Image: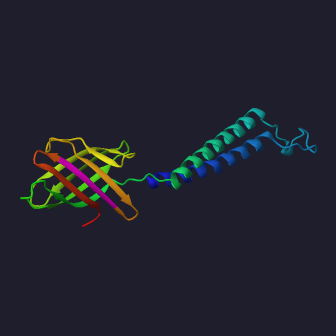
Amino acid sequence: MDMFVEIMWWVCLAGAVIGFLIGLIGKQMLGQKDGRFSTGYKGNKVPNFVSGFLTILIGCGIIYLSLYGLGQFSEMRSNPIVDPVTGKWHGIIYPSDARHNARGFEMTLEMSEDLTVTGSWSVDSIDELMIYEGIWFPEDMEILQTNTERFEDTIHFKIDSHPGRTVVRGEIHEENGTVVIEAERGGG
């Protein structure tokens, strides 16, 4: 997304320059007054007012749209979209039953532009890759898991993002108690 914004910013800048050049061409089509020639115009060329004004109008339109685009993409460049979800996460699952040990897990998530989250996660010592589907709620900094094939209840992951460190904490409520899931993005 960042590369797209950067490219579009430069395209809009180039569009403004091209619009200016088209306007100059239009001005040339209007001709320049000069009393030394029989037509009254420099180079004895008869001006084409319709084409000249139309070309100037098109040039001004291109400049306007380009400057509008520059403003929009400049704002996008200065305020990039923050994605605290996408990435590889490493963490620990703390079971509700004290008879079981905590297990490590790895989770890979990717958030799309419509805020849906997909990915997979695998738990140490379990030879199963679970598919993850969810929805990101940016105002709550929370992911709600939507596929519940493995668990009866949905899992709410709350993300705590600080510069240089993003941590997620989730809970699964079961009959025996609550399973706590904690992970750090890029952590080990």
In depth, the one of 155 and 5 nearer the eye is 155
Q: Is residue 167 magenta?
A: yes
Which residue shows up at 29% across the image and 56% down it? 168
User: How many numbered marks does the figure carry?
Assistant: 0
Q: How is the image coloured?
A: rainbow
In depth, the one of 23 and 141 nearer the eye is 141
Which residue shows up at 82% across the image and 37% down it? 46
Q: Quadrant of the C terminus?
A: bottom left
Residue farthest top in this picture: 50
* Residue 140 percent location from the top left of the image: 36, 46
Q: Quadrant of residue 26?
A: top right
Query: Left or right: 64 with respect to 41?
Result: left
Q: Is residue 168 magenta?
A: yes
Which residue shows up at 77% across the image and 43% down it? 27
* Residue 118 percent location from the top left of the image: 26, 47
Residue 127 sits above or below residue 60 on the image:
below
Residue 95 sits above or below residue 53 on the image:
below
Q: Quadrant of residue 30?
A: top right
In depth, the one of 97 and 144 nearer the eye is 97
Query: Left or right: 61 with respect to 48?
Result: left
Q: Quadrant of residue 39?
A: top right
* Residue 175 percent location from the top left of the image: 11, 45
- Majority SS type along the magenta span: strand
Residue 34 sits above or below residue 106 on the image:
above
In depth, the one of 161 and 126 nearer the eye is 161
Residue farthest left in this picture: 99
Q: Which residues are magenta?
A: 166-172
